[in-house]
Amino acid sequence: MDVQVHGKNMQVSEAIRLAAEEKVGHAGRIFGDGANADVEFTEWRNPRIAGRHRVEITTRTKGHTVRVEASAGDERSALDLAVDKFEQQLRRLKERLVQRSRRHGDPAPAPSEDTVASAGPGPLVRTKRFELRPMTVGEATLEMDLLGHGFFFFLDAETGSHSVLYHRKDGNLGLIVAA
């Protein structure tokens, strides 16, 4: 696995760079497809934040994007946590792909409400239905702030496509537009 290591708001030391390349490369043996992995170290300068160091690992393998992040008090601890999560995600993805290939001859059953409810990490506890009315991004921003939500799904009046407006971690807004 080709590993690219870089820092955001910090310089990554050579020891940490080598440790990241070794550990992420070792985790990449699960697929062994020569994929690229991007490891980003971030340091927050605020001493009040307990997990001041964050590591984000992103790779694209077998047509799937795997992204994990972890925070800790120092770079090495954050790296260890992120690599553990990364290995777990890669193993889970491989299991799903193996299971899919084993039953490739069987038609996939249509998901029922029970399978949809149990697909995630926890049970589905609430379903909301609402009518989409066309609105601009500005109106959607206002509506999202009025509701106090972190995201808002709406029908864009200008493009006619379904869109999601969301709050980013850096305090700005992001927009996802359906193609």
Image (cartoon, rainbow, N blue to C red):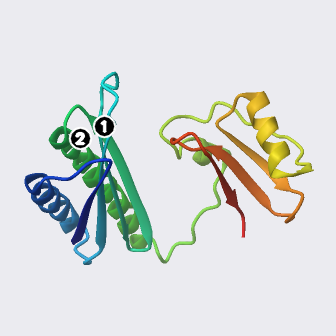
Q: Look at mark 2 in the image and give the residue it sits on.
A: 78
Identity of the residue drawn at 58% across and 47% down: 115
Circle 1 sits in a helix, a strand or a loop, which is it? strand
Disc 2 and disc 1 in contact, CB within 8 angstroms: yes
Q: Residue furthest top?
A: 48
Q: Position of residue 128 (x, y in %)?
A: 77, 36
Query: Which amino acid is tagged 1?
Result: Ser
Q: Is residue 14 left or right of residue 39?
A: left
Q: Is residue 120 above or below residue 48?
A: below
Quarter of the image with the C terminus in it: bottom right
> Against 105, is 74 above or below?
above
52 displayed left or right of 96:
left
Judging from the image, what secondary structure is the residue with disc 2 in? helix
Q: Tell which residue pokes out farthest to the left in this image.
A: 15
Q: Residues within 10 Å of mark 2 (few under 14, many from 20)?
A: many
Q: Residue at coordinates 77% horizontally, 41% vertically from top-left?
A: 141
Q: Residue at x 85, y 65 (%)?
A: 159
Which sits in the foreground, 124 or 155? 155
Q: Earlier in the sequence, mark 2 or mark 1?
A: 1
Q: Which residue is mark 1?
A: 71
Is residue 128 visible to the viewer in this orientation of the structure? no
Instruction: Tell me if residue 26 can be seen.
Output: yes
Q: Mark 2 belongs to which amino acid?
A: Ala
**Label 2, label 1: how many angstroms apart (C-alpha)?**
5 Å
Closer to us: 74 or 31: 74
Q: Position of residue 71 (x, y in %)?
A: 30, 37
Query: In the shown orientation, is residue 65 left or right of residue 44?
Result: right
Residue 103, image x, y percentages: 45, 70
Instruction: Residue at 57%, 72% (x, y): give it.
Output: 107
Q: Position of residue 21 (x, y in %)?
A: 16, 62
